[in-house]
Image: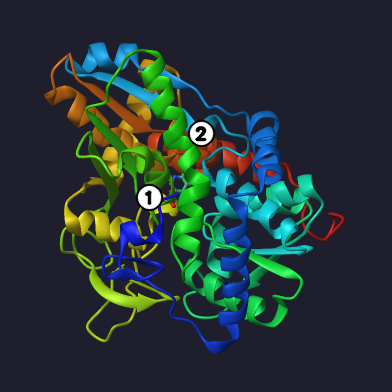
C-alpha cells in the first residue's frame, strides 16, 4: 500500500478529493478502523489466512484469457480478458467483502452490515458471512428488492437478513444512509462493509488495497507471457474493480488506463451515470468529497444505466483525482453498446460478460480495432453475466423470454396455497 503522503497532502485525501465528512457518532468507529488497518502490515497471520481463502474459496488466481477469436475479428491489437467474473459469487466484489470480513473478525466484531443496490455486494457479503460464521444484515432499497428478486433469494439462502429501505428514492443511496444509521448505533459489535472504493476515509484506501489483488495477478500473468500492456480497460461504478485492476501501474506513465462509465441512453440529465469529463460536479455526499451528479440545488440526481452496478451518482475519490490529473482516461459506453459487447464476447469467446463489465468490453473492442497487432489491450471482466439473465434475455430475445416467464408464473401455486 502506498503511504498516504504519496496520494495527497492530508491523510485520506487524493488531491482535493476524499476525506472524512461524518457526524460525530461515526468518528469513533472510523478511528477504530484506522487503528485496525494500521496493524495489518505486520499481521502475517491475516495475510496468510486471506491468501488461503482467496485460493480455496474465491478460486484465485482468476484466469487471464487471450481472446484470440476476438482479436482476429477486430483486426488490430491483441486482446486479453481478465476473467474476474469467475470468482465465487460471480464478481470482484468478493475480494473486498472477504478482506473486510476477516478484518472485522480481527477487531472482535460478530456482526456485519452492508448496503446493496443490484445485490452483487450484498450477495458476496452474505456468502462470506456464511463461510466465516458472522451474523449478516443487508440494507437494500425497496425498489431494488422488487427488481432484483434472484439476488434477494440468494442472500437469504446464505442466511442473511435483507432489510427493505423505504426512505428517499428507495434505492442504493438510501440503503447507504440506513446502513450508516445502523452502524452509528451498533459499532461496538458490528462492522460496516462498504461495497466500493468510496465513502469516508479509510474506506477508499482499504477497498483499493483488497481489490489490488486483481491488478497484481494481471501484472504477473502478463509478465509470465512476456507481454507489456499498452492499455488497460475497466468499467467504473464506484470504481473498486478499476482501481484494483489499475493499481500496479498508477504511479507509472504507462500503460494507458481507461475507465468506462455508464453512458445509458444519452447525455441528458437522468439518462446516464457518467461523472467524469465534465458531467459531474464536486460535492460532499455520504461522508466523502468527490465528483457527483447533482442538480442545481445540490441534490443527488437520478441516474440511468442498463447495468445496476454502474448507476451510483458518485465516483470514488481516488479515481476522481486520477481522472482530473489525467493519469486515468474516461470514456462512456451506452446501454446498447454494452449489450452489443455481451453478444460479441459470448459469440467469439464463449464468455458472458456482466452488463457492467461489458461497458469496459465495448471500449476494449474499439481500442483493439484501432491499435496495432504488436500492442496489447487488457480488459477486466469484473463480473460474469449469469446474474443479468432477466435483463439480457428480455432485451435480446423478448418474445421467447416473455413466454417462458408467463409459463413459469402459471406453474407457481397462488400465494394463498403456497407455504408462506
Ligand atoms: C458492482 C459492480 C461493478 C461496479 O462497481 P465498481 O466498484 O466500480 O467496481 C462493476 N462490475 C460488476 C460485475 C459489479 O458487480
Residue drawn at point x = 37 percent, y = 45 percent: 242
User: In which image quadrant can residue 37 be found?
Assistant: bottom right
Q: Which residue is mark 2?
A: 85
Estimate the x, y position of residue 336 in percent, counting from the top left: 28, 42
> Which of the two residues, 192 or 398, is positioned nearer the viewer here?
192
- Which of labels 1 and 2 is toward the front? 2
314 relative to 281 in the view: left or right:
right
Distance from mark 1 CB to nearest ligand 1 atom below 8 Å: no
Q: Nearer the viewer, residue 384 or 238?
A: 238
Q: Residues within 10 Å of mark 1 (few under 14, many from 20)?
A: many
Q: State how the image is colored.
A: rainbow
Please state, as top left, top right, bottom left or bottom right, where the C terminus lies in the image: bottom right
Residue 223, image x and y in percent? 37, 19
SS type, badge 2? helix
Q: Which residue: 49% across, 80% down?
A: 168
Report the residue marked by disc 1: 306
Q: In the visual, does 68 lie left or right of 57?
A: left
Helix, strand or loop for disc 1: loop
Q: Nearer the viewer, residue 179 or 413?
A: 179
Disc 1 to disc 2, how far (Cα)? 18 Å
Q: x, y percentage for residue 92?
A: 51, 41
Amino acid at each position: 500500500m502506498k503511504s498516504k503522503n504519496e496520494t495527497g497532502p492530508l491523510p485520506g485525501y487524493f488531491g482535493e478529493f476524499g476525506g472524512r465528512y461524518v457526524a460525530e457518532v461515526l468518528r469513533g468507529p472510523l478511528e477504530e478502523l484506522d487503528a485496525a488497518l494500521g496493524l495489518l502490515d505486520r499481521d502475517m497471520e491475516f495475510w496468510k489466512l486471506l491468501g488461503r481463502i482467496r485460493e480455496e474459496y474465491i478460486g484465485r488466481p482468476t484466469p487471464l484469457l487471450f481472446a484470440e477469436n476476438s482479436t482476429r475479428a477486430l483486426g488490430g491489437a491483441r486482446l486479453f480478458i481478465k476473467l474476474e467474473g469467475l470468482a465465487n459469487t460471480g464478481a470482484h466484489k468478493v475480494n473486498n467483502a472477504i478482506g473486510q470480513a476477516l478484518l472485522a473478525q480481527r477487531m472482535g466484531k460478530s456482526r456485519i452490515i452492508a448496503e446493496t443496490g443490484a445485490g452483487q455486494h450484498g450477495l458476496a457479503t452474505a456468502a462470506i458471512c456464511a463461510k466465516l460464521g458472522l451474523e449478516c444484515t443487508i440494507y437494500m432499497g425497496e425498489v431494488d428488492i422488487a427488481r432484483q428478486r434472484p439476488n434477494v433469494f440468494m442472500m437469504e439462502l446464505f442466511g442473511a437478513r435483507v432489510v427493505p429501505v423505504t426512505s428517499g428514492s428507495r434505492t442504493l443511496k438510501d440503503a447507504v444512509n440506513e446502513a450508516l444509521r445502523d452502524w452509528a448505533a451498533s459499532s461496538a459489535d458490528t462492522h460496516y462493509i462498504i461495497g466500493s472504493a468510496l465513502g469516508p476515509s479509510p474506506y477508499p484506501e482499504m477497498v483499493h488495497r483488497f481489490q489490488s489483488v486483481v491488478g497484481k495477478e494481471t501484472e504477473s500473468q502478463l509478465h509470465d507471457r512476456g507481454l507489456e500492456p499498452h492499455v488497460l480497460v475497466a468499467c467504473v461504478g464506484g470504481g473498486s474493480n478499476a482501481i484494483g485492476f489499475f493499481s500496479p501501474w498508477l504511479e507509472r506513465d504507462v500503460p494507458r488506463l481507461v475507465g468506462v462509465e455508464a453512458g445509458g441512453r444519452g447525455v441528458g440529465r437522468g439518462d446516464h451515470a457518467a461523472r467524469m469529463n465534465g458531467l459531474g460536479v464536486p460535492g460532499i455526499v455520504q461522508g466523502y468529497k468527490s465528483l457527483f451528479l447533482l442538480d442545481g440545488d445540490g441534490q443527488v440526481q437520478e441516474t440511468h444505466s442498463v447495468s445496476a452496478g454502474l448507476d451510483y451518482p458518485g465516483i470514488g475519490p481516488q479515481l476522481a483525482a486520477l481522472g482530473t490529473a489525467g493519469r486515468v482516461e474516461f470514456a462512456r459506453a451506452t446501454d446498447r453498446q454494452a449489450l452489443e459487447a455481451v453478444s460479441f464476447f459470448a459469440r467469439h469467446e464463449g464468455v458472458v460478460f456482466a452488463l457492467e463489465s461489458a461497458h469496459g468490453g465495448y471500449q476494449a473492442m474499439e481500442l483493439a480495432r484501432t491499435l496495432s497487432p504488436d500492442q496489447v489491450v487488457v480488459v477486466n471482466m469484473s463480473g460474469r453475466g449469469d446474474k443479468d439473465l432477466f435483463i439480457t434475455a428480455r432485451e435480446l430475445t423478448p418474445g421467447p423470454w416473455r413466454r417462458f416467464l408467463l409459463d413459469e408464473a402459471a406453474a407457481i401455486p397462488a400465494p394463498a396455497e403456497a407455504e408462506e
